Amino acid sequence: MITIAKNRFYTGNTTSLFSAEVAKHVRQFHTRIENYQPTPLVSLSMLAKKLGVKAIVIKDESHRFGLKAYKALGGSYALGQILADRLNIDIRDLDINTVAAKLETPLIFITATAGNHGIGVAWAAQKMGQKAIIYMPKGSPIANAERVRELGSECFITDDNYDDTVRLANNIAQKNHWILIQDTAWEGYHDIPTWICQGYLTMADEAVEQMALLDLDTPTHVMLQAGVGSMAGSMLEYLVDKLGPESFQSIITEPSVANCIFRSGTSAHGDRVNVSENIDTIMTGMACEVPRVLDTIMTGLACDEPNPDTWPILKQCSNYFAHADDSVSAVGMRVLGNPLIGDTQVISGASGAITLGLLYQLCQDSRYLDSREQLGLNQDAVILLFNTEGDTNPSGYRDIVWNGS
Ligand SMILES: Cc1ncc(COP(=O)(O)O)c(C=O)c1O
């Protein structure tokens, strides 16, 4: 099941936090990390033909730094900024390989996360000779905790939910004068989440360059998945700045049970507000909360409140808000993992595949014909997607792709 709504708040206005100019510096930082390589941009030309569009290109972040997800781009850039700050130098002058030797003792970073972000922070801390401590909420996959430990960080799985685990990490950070590295903002906590979001821009910057190298037209459609909307907001601002606000249609997609961006974006006029019994918020067009029942296979997107710093970008620059249930993402995983002859296989986890699942359903299912037409998903459409994770949970991946769960 898919729900899609036009954004009535669209203005095309951006901030200047995630501009193409900022992306240049961010990418320059990432290229200095050992083994940095742009992730592939895969053109699924057979699938495009089958779905009746001109091109489908997917940026495959399952190859990012050997970590199977894009998240380390954010954690590493934030750590770089903090270290540069400590040494009183510009991040452009930070030598990742020798920075540890310039500090008397390593800095200690702490974060609360169910998976990809924590793995990214642990990896970045290891690369830069620093220390990271990762707290995971109850129910987090043991495999993720093990990956964090393999990267040299301590990892604890708490008895609390995600929000309480963030509070716990924050308290521990304050008590010990450690540095909290969280991928969403709140009152009084802005710089670090901004650096994390800026870190994601390398992915968009590579994609735009790779499209030109593949001799593809610039995208007519960009589909981005969202949890709190940090990634989608920063990437969208970059793309609007680089390509122009009117040059493409953007569609922000979430799991239906965690559709806080959709709810926020469709709220002010009261149309398409899907208020559940747990919501007593007056819908105002401001960021709002969704119920705490976030049971979805898209664990990376299971978020209940938009990032207040990137929400304004999504509010002003997205063209459409959408949400889809788990089966849509599962279809996306299966289509990407079992390509048509001539197309490249893309291994995509549930949070990575939701946009392809959405596109596939829109183009294949006659119930969505009107939406398809409204969106202009026709023979001229060049669609850019981001596979934000691979099989970060291999047994969960097989359950869905092999066993049809
Ligand atoms: C694989 C994956 N994709 C997308 C996202 C969405 O990111 P955000 O919470 O910034 O919207 C996440 C967040 O952790 C993720 O792990």
Image: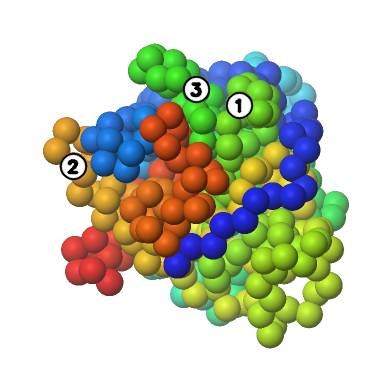
- Judging by the rendered image, the residue that carries numbered circle 1 is 247
Residue 403 visible in the picture: yes
Q: Nearer the viewer, mark 1 or mark 2?
A: 1
- Judging by the rendered image, the residue that carries numbered circle 3 is 218
Residue at 53% in and 24% down: 205
Under circle 3, the secondary element is: loop
- Judging by the rendered image, the residue that carries numbered circle 2 is 340
Q: Which mark is residue 119?
A: none
Residue at 50% in and 53% down: 370
Q: Marks 3 and 2: CB-CB under 8 Å? A: no
Q: Nearer the viewer, residue 31 or 7?
A: 7
Mark 1 or mark 3: whose residue is earlier in sequence: 3
Split into 4 quadrants, where in the image is the C terminus? bottom left
Q: Height in image: 74 above or below 140?
A: above
Q: Which amino acid does the dot numbered 1 rest on? A: Ser
Under circle 2, the secondary element is: loop
Split into 4 quadrants, where in the image is the N terminus? bottom left
Query: In the picture provided, is 305 more to the left or to the right than 97?
Result: right
Q: Nearer the viewer, residue 379 or 349?
A: 379
* Separation (CA) of disc 3 from disc 2: 24 Å
Query: In the picture provided, is 367 more to the left or to the right than 199?
Result: left
Q: Position of residue 12 (x, y in %)?
A: 74, 34
Residue 118 visible in the picture: no
Residue at 77% in and 28% down: 16
Q: Residues within 10 Å of mark 3 (few under 14, many from 20)?
A: some
